[in-house]
Image (cartoon, rainbow, N blue to C red):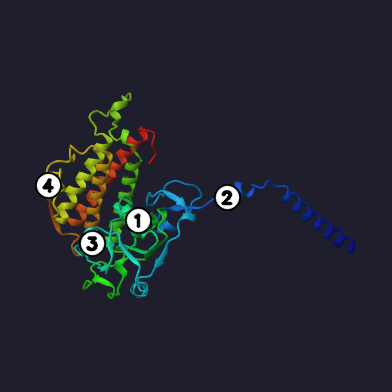
Amino acid sequence: MQNLITAFKAALLASIFLLTIQSSRMPANYIDQTASDDEYVCSPCGQDCDNTEYHSPGTCPNCNMPLVKKSTVHITNIKPTEICSYIASHPGVVLLDVRSKEEYEGKANPDYGTLKGAINIPVQVLESKLSTIENLKNKEIIVYCSHSHRSPAATYILMQHGFTNVKNLAGGMSVMNDNDCKKSAPASKQVAEGSLTPAVERLLNFTENSIIKLAEKIPEDKFNFTPESLNISGANFKDVRTFAGQVKHLATDNYHIWTAITSDPLPPGVHEGDVNGPAEMTSKADIMKFLKDSFILGHKVTAGLTEKNAMEMISFRGGKLPRLDLTWYALTHDQEHYGQMVVYARLCGIAP
């Protein structure tokens, strides 16, 4: 029996030795063949998908934001319960409100208030306005919005452009109960976290990101592309809009629908009964600004959507629709044309 145990131990040791030798002979890149060089996450959007990891670049299937290397995302959050005391102990901190102008000025309904001394640059135009805050690159900046859906994206934009000390207000103004550092302190909040406003805002953010990202991918020389020019056998693209026409139409209807809710005036070049947008607007830069500004109005609409007013009847194109129905109509119309824009892009060899 003793000889059998001794032989078993010898065989076990020999096996371990052989495995060690075999491991030492494995190519240096063996592990790299079974694991990706880096993990990927979606560009911060403030939604649950921010925490989902991927093993290759691409597009987030939930929010349609591009995937970025996880190693580039280092967002520091400040709790809403701590923000006022933090501001008091850091008098040089810059407060950046990335909501719409109406939300910032307390004209939206509900009004969640604004932090004292904050500056306002809506997230939709932040990248184009970075030159105006170049002097703040080495300052400490706290970014905030209403529900922390827009501020993480703005925080990431700033960090990717060399701003060295940026923090995000977790939860946003909608969950902040401390009024000590607010410029305006509403008497009560009309919408709780998780009710209509944040739910519709999530869909608005998804729709807006999808459309703007796709439009930005189309080069200037393809902006007036139409499938009709390809003369595809068996296809019927006769008299369809150009890609630029699709974008202008989509934005124009955004203005028509959302101004019916907010009572804002239509922008210059947009008239009642017109669904094509300003004819004189031809450059990609002007059309993109027209598009982005239309979504700023959309955020004003969702900020004012409450459980109490959701079924309020709004006059629109000779009839009346509930406020919530009209809000959804704008978003479904946008998605319909986004689908057409994807076809145009793929015919140009561009993936969304």
Along the polypeptide, which appears first: circle 2 or circle 4? 2
Report whether residue 226 is seen: yes
> Seen from this angle, which residue lies furthest front?
135
Of badges 4 and 1, the one in the foreground is 1
Residue 71 drawn at (x, y percent): 49, 55
Closest to the observer, 81 or 134: 134
Query: Label 3, on which residue?
Result: 103
Query: Label 2, on which residue?
Result: 35
| Amino acid at the residue labelled 3 | Glu
Residue appearing at x 66%, y 47% in the figure: 28
| Amino acid at the residue labelled 4 | Arg
Left or right: 207, with 110 as reference point = right
At label 4, counting other C-alpha atoms closer than 10 Å, the crowd grade (few under 14, some 14-19, many 20 or more) is few
SS for callout 4: loop
Q: Residue 132 occupies which quadrant of the picture?
A: bottom left
Residue appearing at x 85%, y 62% in the figure: 5
Q: State the mark number for residue 317.
A: 4
Query: Label 1, on which residue?
Result: 134
Along the polypeptide, which appears first: circle 2 or circle 3? 2
